Image (spheres, rainbow, N blue to C red):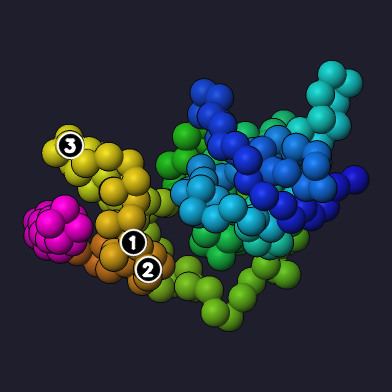
Amino acid sequence: MISWLKGEKIHAWKMSSKKGVVLNVGGVGYEIQLLPKQIGKAEDSNKIELWIHQINREDITSLYGFREVNQRDLFREIISVNGIGPQIGIALLEDFEVGQLVNAIENKKSNLLIKTQGIGKRIADRLIVELGNKLQRFMDNNETSYDDKKDIEPNQFSKYIDEIYLILNSLGYVDNEIKDSIKIITTNEKENALLLNSLSAKEKEELMDKHLKVILMKLSEKST
């Protein structure tokens, strides 16, 4: 059973909604599915370390990679629930940080879980019933508590960044330019996600205008 891999990224791939990398480890290429939000970080680095969950079936062996061991271990708990497969686990960990997802399950907040694509009320309730008392080891005093973030939308900051990306792309900037420039506002992702949650729709528009002005200024400086 493969549990951890360290190697050089030689290829990034996409198949429908699935995204991943091919990792060269000792001359062997391992095809590994990642959380989509981790692809950008993988593309920025040649050397990658991943915690792996391996699933063997009669016709195929699949590898799922995670930057953090607690992501991998929570993924294992999720797919241990009857009727829940790896793509649901990937979708949940894409939309939630570990602490947020554990808090949603522990506090029986199915209304948060069903916001993830592919998660209906029945699946959300099954997760709550079967995992409700099994996730204490994932609780971390440094994680945002449920009371502090009860209305946070899953993956809100990621969606905000995607919107900025589309705007810059429509202005003619290419992928590498955009990824480099938006690092200005992705340094403190968790802090910015909490900030977004506290703003009104109008305030979010004003914040986006502010961020776009800063990014465009940086891009214009590079072009001169």
**Which mark is drawn over residue 187?**
2
| Residue 188 vertical position relative to residue 95 in the rendered view, above or below | below
- Disc nearest the viewer among 3 and 1: 3
Q: Is residue 197 left or right of residue 50?
A: left
Instruction: Answer with mark 3 or mark 1, whichever residue precedes in sequence.
Output: 3
Q: Main secondary structure of the magenta part?
A: helix
Say what secondary structure mark 3 lies in.
Answer: loop
Residue 124 visible at all: no
Q: Nearer the viewer, residue 205 or 134?
A: 205
Q: Secondary structure at mark 2?
A: loop
| Image-based side of 186 in relation to 75, left or right | left
Residue 45 bears which disc, if any? none
Crowd around label 3: few <14 · some 14–19 · many ≥20 (10 Å): few
Residue, far top: 59
Tell me the residue that label 3 is attached to: 172
Question: Which quarter of the image is occupied by the N terminus?
Answer: top right
Q: Is residue 156 left or right of residue 215?
A: right
Calculate the distance from the C-alpha at mark 3 to the C-alpha at mark 1. 18 Å
- Total marks in image: 3
Frontmost residue, 118 versus 178: 178
Alpha-carbon span between mark 2 and mark 3? 24 Å
State the CA–CA distance, disc 1 to disc 2.
6 Å
* Image x and y of residue 142, in percent: 54, 79
- Whole-percent x, y for residue 67 in the image: 63, 58
Q: Is residue 4 visible?
A: yes
- Residue type (three-letter) at the residue carrying disc 1: Lys
Residue 130 lies, in percent from the top left, at 72, 48
Residue at x 70% of width, y 35% of height = 31
x, y percentage for residue 138?
67, 67
Instruction: From the image, tell me which residue sits under label 1.
Output: 183
